[in-house]
Amino acid sequence: MSELTVDFQNVFEGPGVPAESLFQAWAQTAWLGEEPSEVTIRIVDIEESQALNHQYRGKDKPTNVLSFPFEAPAGITVPLAGDLVICAPVVENEARDQHKELSTHWAHMVVHGMLHLQGYDHIDDEEAEAMEALEIRLLAQFGFGNPYEAEETVKDS
């Protein structure tokens, strides 16, 4: 695992956002690349998340995390993984609604987004299972439990 530089931007004006050092640790752990790289993690409000989600995904609502992998022009090699945009109010609401510790859910959003930047996806069941298994393993390194267990028990009831 190589070094990952995290450019941290917190433009959300409110409490509850974990320390920058935690974002650094979570992102570094989820960086599986062989080469050093850089990621920007931007913490935003509802309005910015909704605008970006609408512009890039055609969904007119805020979302927890958006991943923007860096696509270098042909012949250019720049060590950039891309950008993560995480909406603080959505993360806080999901953590509360899913009965999860706030810091655990923040860590999950960073790990989830970092895997997207590295080409992992959850469009079909097989890809989703592989991505979720990796997320569970990476989060366990911080002592966090399976982030999908709570959701499954909620769905079953």
Image (cartoon, helix red, strand yellow):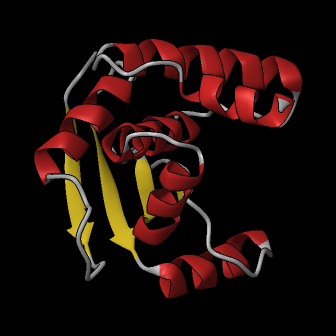
Residue 21 shows in the view: yes
Percent from the top left, x then y, of residue 83? 42, 57
Percent from the top left, x then y, of residue 46? 51, 81
As drawn, 90 above or below 13: above
As drawn, 3 above or below 93: above
Residue drawn where x is 31% and y is 37% of the image? 27
Depth check, front residue: 153 or 77: 153
Left or right of residue 149: residue 127: right
Residue 70 shows in the view: no
Quadrant where the N terminus sits is top left
Left or right of residue 33: residue 37: left
Residue drawn where x is 20% and y is 33% of the image? 25
Percent from the top left, x then y, of residue 127? 77, 22
Left or right of residue 115: residue 102: left
Quadrant where the C terminus sits is top right
Residue drawn where x is 24% and y is 21% of the image? 2
Quarter of image, res 151: top right
As drawn, 78 above or below 29: below
